[in-house]
Image: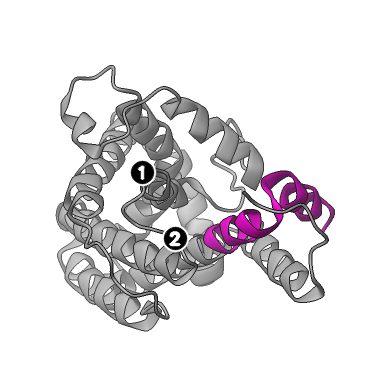
Amino acid sequence: MPQTKSITPTDYATLKAAKRKMENVHWAMQGLNKVGNVIESRISLLPKKQQQWLHQLSYKVLHSVVKANLASMKKGKVKSDPWNKTYKALVTSSGLVGGALGASAFAVDLTLATKLMMRSIMDIARSEGEDLTEFDTQLACLQVFALGGKTKHDNSLETGYYASRIAIGSAVKGGTKALEGLLRGSTNPLLQFIATVAARFSVQVSEKFVAQAIPVLGAAGGASINLAFIHHFQNMAQAHFAIRRLERTYGAETVKTAYEAA
């Protein structure tokens, strides 16, 4: 059971760094400043039907990621430093193809990039001492796709870190403790959890879609977009699992109070 004790200066610095990552401006503004205004204006003009397609695609991709990555996890793998650069290179390469082919290849690119990003998130979780065979850790990995700074397009969502955790976590209460439950019908709380995450993930997916549809960007632009995409979610994962590690040491309430004061 976690001990209630004062957070050391080193761990408090870790917590402050995690909060900075969590509350930073979203990925598009960090990685795509030159076309940021174009992206913002085009998202607001997306037809309702296209917005619905992007949301449905976000859900479908996350569902496939859970089955392909989380359910095939290797047990007993030794904790080590995460391979962030390797995964960045792989996701960037995926963007080269998607960018060259344009919006028509978007679904394929998003699926591959998201599967690789989940692998990177799992890698980061393991480096922070998480047991990837635990159901709670698997949900925490998926939850990373719902985390990030506030944007103009997510005003209806709770975007504070702890508010997001509460909102997303409530979707899976009483759910099955096995990923096989994904195959047991639409009322499964685990599917509701994925839908809740997808609602938030689709904000970034919409930005990616609009950016890749800008002709001037081409293949090189597709690679840059994917690099910004994975950089954002690696930052979210590093912050999220550092906070969870501190919670295991000091207790959730102690860390939450310190986070809010940092």
**In the rendered image, the vertical position of residue 243 relative to residue 56, given as above or below:** below
In the orientation shown, which residue stands out farthest toward the front? 1
Q: Nearer the viewer, residue 203 or 125?
A: 125
- Alpha carbon separation for disc pair 2 and 1: 11 Å
In the orientation shown, which residue stands out farthest toward the top? 187
Horizontal side of residue 167 vs 246, given as left or right: left
The residue located at (50%, 34%) in the rendering is: 168
The percent position of residue 136, horizontal first and vertical second, equals 42, 44
Q: Which mark is residue 135?
A: 1
Q: Which mark is residue 147?
A: none
The quarter of the image holding the C terminus is bottom right
Magenta stretch containing residue 20, yes or no? no
The residue located at (38%, 48%) in the rendering is: 142
The residue located at (34%, 76%) in the rendering is: 88
- Residue wearing tag 2: 130
The percent position of residue 135, horizontal first and vertical second, equals 36, 43
Q: Amino acid at mark 1?
A: Phe
Horizontal side of residue 201 vs 90, given as left or right: right
The residue located at (69%, 70%) in the rendering is: 14
Q: Which residues are magenta?
A: 240-262
* Residues at discs 2 and 1 in contact (Cβ within 8 Å): no
Q: Earlier in the sequence, mark 2 or mark 1?
A: 2
Secondary-structure class at tag 2 = loop
Q: Residues within 10 Å of mark 1 (few under 14, many from 20)?
A: some
Secondary-structure class at tag 1 = helix
**In the rendered image, the vertical position of residue 117 relative to residue 253, given as above or below:** below
The percent position of residue 30, horizontal first and vertical second, equals 55, 68
Q: Nearer the viewer, residue 155 or 164?
A: 164
Magenta stretch containing residue 242, yes or no? yes
